[in-house]
Image (cartoon, rainbow, N blue to C red):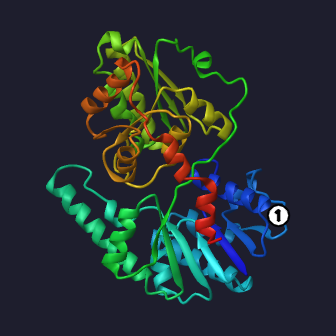
Amino acid sequence: MRVIICDIYVKLVGHNLGHIQNILRYLEQNPNDTEYIFLLNPEAKTIPSIRSSAKNVQIIFFTDEEFAPQLSGMSLIKSTQLLWKSVTKYMNDWKADRLILMMVDMFQHTIGSSRSSCEITGIMFNPYPRVIPAANTLRAKQQTAITKARKLFTSWWMLRNKNLKKVFIFNDRQTVQSMNETLGTKIFTYLPDPVYNYPSRQGLFIRQKYKINDDRKILLAFGMIDSKKNVVNLLKGLQQLSAEDAAKTCLLIVGKIRPEYEAPLAEAIKEAKSLHPSLQVELESRFVDDDEMECFVGQSDVISLAYVNFYSSSGVIGLACRHNKPIIATKFGVVGDQTREYQLGITVDGHSPEEIKEAFQYFLHTAAPEYPKRAKDFVQAHTSEAFIKTLLEL
């Protein structure tokens, strides 16, 4: 059997790299008779960890010419139609038996319009049932209704392809059931979002590096820093603390900041510091390696998942659980459900600085917080092996 695993978003920033790295490592350690061809974006060629010694694994890359539509700025529909022609060519040239798309969302319309030569499976990151209005206004509700209708139609259209066998959805049995019932299918399938285990960087001590006193609680905002990470509202919440509490607080922001978010974030930091000069804010605006990431999460006190306009699974929740760290999470979507189910922390409306402040005050003033209660259970239910075996159908 020959399987093509296609991922067009393998970069030093984001979760896609972690998935590919761990699948490659698993196949090295667990050889089988299936031949795996990893078809990746050209940028992935420059990442040293994208390699394998497994005899049944080959790694190939789209050419710059084939991948040009994805970088051209043309519409998503047009660019993915052109890219899909290249995917189809690789399927035919390699005589693949199965194609696994590591992100199926943008290919839904092309899958539904094509007649593929092999089975197709893939991971859907943004299923329509979890979309909710960004604000409690009529306009926001109308926009959400239109978005959900469009996403529902696109999902239905994708199902026209009879070679589409499974669409995996991370950590969300409720959405799997809802989509299967609504669309009259059994294709949508639960997939555990994996908790990866990386070594910590030796000699990296966060408090020492940023001169954070032991009496300060560190609230960590981690990952690609953009509007959904909601750091501006974290700052607005922390600036509502008393002067005494602010002097016991450090907001640690770690991750590459998206260009459009740089100005509002800088303004929010300036405002918070002007109101509370004793509030410590540390910013590390760059991609951090896996072993650094382990130190940042493991040495912080509370982890922020108080996201906005984000309803899917997040790998940060698994990191927090593995280090047994409490979280402040959004009330909504998969992250909110998991936080409540496993009693991992406090859920808030990310649009409410007041709720964020109150949640952080709980951890600031509670000597022995009750959270997280079931972090170990979460980790055991979301192992890397469970993810890979389900995805590769081993």
Within 10 angstroms of label 1, few (less than 14), some, or many (20 or more) residues?
A: some
Which of the 4 image quadrants contains residue 154? bottom left
Residue 43 pos. (x, y %): 68, 57
Q: Is residue 284 visible?
A: yes
User: How many marks overall?
Assistant: 1
Q: Is residue 258 visible?
A: no
Residue 338 pos. (x, y %): 40, 49
Quarter of the image containing the C terminus?
bottom right
Q: Nearer the viewer, residue 375 or 292?
A: 375
Quarter of the image containing the N terminus?
bottom right
Which of the 4 image quadrants contains residue 10? bottom right
Q: Residue drawn at (55%, 33%), measured in percent from left and top?
A: 297
Q: Nearer the viewer, residue 259 or 310?
A: 310
Q: Residue drawn at (57%, 14%), measured in percent from left and top?
A: 211
Q: Helix, strand, or loop for circle 1?
A: loop
- 366 versus 61 height, above or below: above
- 303 versus 7 height, above or below: above
Which residue is label 1 attached to?
A: 54
- 132 versus 276 height, above or below: below
- Would residue 140 appear left or right of 48 to someone viewing this image? left
- Would residue 376 appear left or right of 85 to someone viewing this image? left
Three-letter amino acid code at disc 1? Ala
- Would residue 164 appear left or right of 45 to someone viewing this image? left
Q: Residue drawn at (40%, 11%), measured in percent from left and top?
A: 247
Which of the 4 image quadrants contains residue 130? bottom left
Residue 69 pos. (x, y %): 57, 69
Residue 198 pos. (x, y %): 67, 41
